[in-house]
Amino acid sequence: MSENDEKSLDLATKWHLELPILVDNVKLIDGVKNKNLQNSPVGTLYLTATHLIFVDCTGKKETWILHMHVSSVSKQSLSTTGCPLVIRCKTFQVVTFIIPKERDCHDIYTSLLKLSKPGFYLSNLCLFPQQNKYSTTTTTKITTAEYSQLFAFHYTPSNDLANESKTIGWDAIDLRSEYLRMGVPNKNWIEYDQTNDYELCDTYPRFLYMPSGVSKTLIKGTSKFRSRGRLPVLSYLHVDQSQSLAAICRCAQPLSGLTARCNEDEDFLQCIITANPNSNCMYVVDNRPMINALANRAKGKGYENESNYQNIKFHFAGIENIHVMRNSLNSLREACEKNLSMSGWLKALKESGWLKHVKDVLDASKFVADAIKSGTSVLVHCSDGWDRTAQTCALASLILDPYYRTIEGFQFNERLLFELHDHAYSCQFGTFIGNCEKDRIDLRLREKTYSLWSEIRSKFNDFINPFYEKEHETCLELRALKPDTSPSVIKFWKELYLRYDFGAQPRESVSDTVSTLKDHIISLKEHANLLENRIGTLCRLLNKEEETVKASISMISSSESMDFSTLQILDDTITSPTSSSVTSPGDNESGFEDSSISRSSSFDCLQVIYTIYLSISLSRPIIFYS
């Protein structure tokens, strides 16, 4: 048993689980589309404190499912073949185990329910129940002590990371350093310290960046006027060749209702406009559909009243809320699990609305980026200033700034996106625990858990984007991306959503193919350099001027047809002695013999050089013929 399993057994003991559980003669069906039981592998199913593991009878194939990846577990009716247990994962993997005995199936089913949703069961250990507004069941708020039972607090890497300090990965991202890279603070933007009490907004970082013209009165006034205290703060400052100083700021919706207004909030937004000296107006991008924003006005919230805010242009992005997104993703998941005809698949994909949501986020981000490129600052919000706001601000920044497309910034390929997607649910690292900086400090994640960025930094080469163009960093015209968001280019991401449908996937992705080709090109260049060095060595051995040999090679390469008689003529030219060193046959009877030996040796060497030259030109292995 691994060290991680031993630590996690404490939690299993608290739930009165007897682990590990072992069941023989279990059939595995990969996916829900595959109904062929005859070809299904048979093996042993193990339930440990951290994983559900299937090992086929040959021992050659293993299927590992992390408990925290399990989205749902359903036990179906007992049949003649056994009791089916269907497991759906947050990674879009679906597996079915046919377990011979109903009792064994029930034991694994109940154990998986507890192990895959520790938060729900941990809440039963707390003292003060709390009603969840989205459900009819009574749950409780998980305390810091109960968080410590999660997998991340017990996980120990098996690689070199185990010997490193846990803080290394946490140091990979430093917010203040990132703002310094953008040139903030400066005369237009200041740093504001909330102190350890997070006095303005406990879901914001401690250090905030605001326009230099604001006073403490304005700061506190606008914080009270914004939902959850999430006042406007700087997210990204764009400095280009025109020195526009346009900024992306983010916040939550105002508590304006139908008639309410706040002078401090109005003045605060004017300070953001003033911080960009090259523009006298600003966009306010509300990521919600307009009808949703109007509905919030009836609840005392809503959006900025244009008659109260000067020099403001409004734009509604029309991105749906998280509940609509969740339902859309569930519909997409159901479509992926069915055996549909072409028309059925296209209909299900359309009805899920998923690609429309993707396009809406891209369109909003592109609008923000275009406004910034034109020199106009943008304030982005939705209802509470998270989810849609974070997506839009982050993607717009990536479009604008080539730094975020570098290794130090956020260069990525599909592998990295898969890694982030999987570990967002794995609970293996502390990176995704907690909703904000204050949560992470309260839970002492930096001291008690490993950061995912340590793992990623240890295998950077796997995540390099082969399509990255370095000249985009310096070429002004190429610095900002120009994404095409027309409907015809928005594609279904089958590499993620059908990752475990092996029949739908190519043997190798385009990204991996390009990476392999680039590695091969680098190898060929190194081989060519090696061959060029050998040519230099041979030239020195012949005690000839290197330029003379290169000239001969140039003559060879310029000839459409070349035989060794031509080489003989070239050899005569290269090896003929100068007038001062000519020795007549009369002076030395063996002179002709010595000369022929020299000429033969020189000819052989030139033949070698010619062979090497062809190898460089054709990038083929060298073959010498005796």
Image: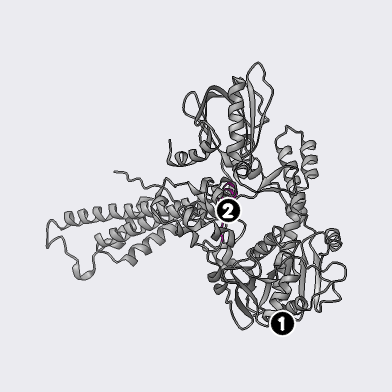
Q: Left or right? Give the position of 445 relative to 339.
A: left
Q: Residue at x 20, y 57 (%)?
A: 595
Residue 274, which numbered label?
A: 1
- Quadrant of the snapshot with the N terminus: top left
Q: Pointer 1: residues within 10 angstroms few (<14), some, or many (20+)? A: some
Rendered view: 432 above or below 469? above
Q: Left or right? Give the position of 593 relative to 229.
A: left
- Quadrant of the snapshot with the C terminus: top left
How far across and down, in percent of the image, does residue 277 sit?
Answer: 70, 83
Mark nearer the N terminus (1 vs 2)? 1
Does residue 440 show up magenta in the picture? no
Residue sitting farthest toward the top: 80
How far across and down, in percent of the image, does residue 176 sit?
Answer: 55, 71
Residue sitting farthest toward the front: 127
Q: Residue at x 61, y 60 (%)?
A: 436
Query: Of the residues shown, which amino acid type is indicated by label 1?
Result: Thr
Label 2: element kind: helix
Q: CA distance from mark 1 to mark 2?
A: 37 Å
| Residue 506 visible from this viewpoint | no
Determine the image quadrant of residue 166.
bottom left
How far across and down, in percent of the image, does residue 454 sit?
Answer: 47, 55
Q: Which span is picked out in magenta?
A: 410-422
Considering the whole magenta stretch, tell me its main secondary structure: helix
| Residue 466 visible from this viewpoint | yes
Rendered view: 276 above or below 58? below
Query: Which residue is denoted by mark 2 in the rendering?
Result: 432
Query: Of the residues shown, which amino acid type is indicated by label 2?
Result: Phe
Label 1: element kind: helix
How far across and down, in percent of the image, does residue 374 sit?
Answer: 72, 74
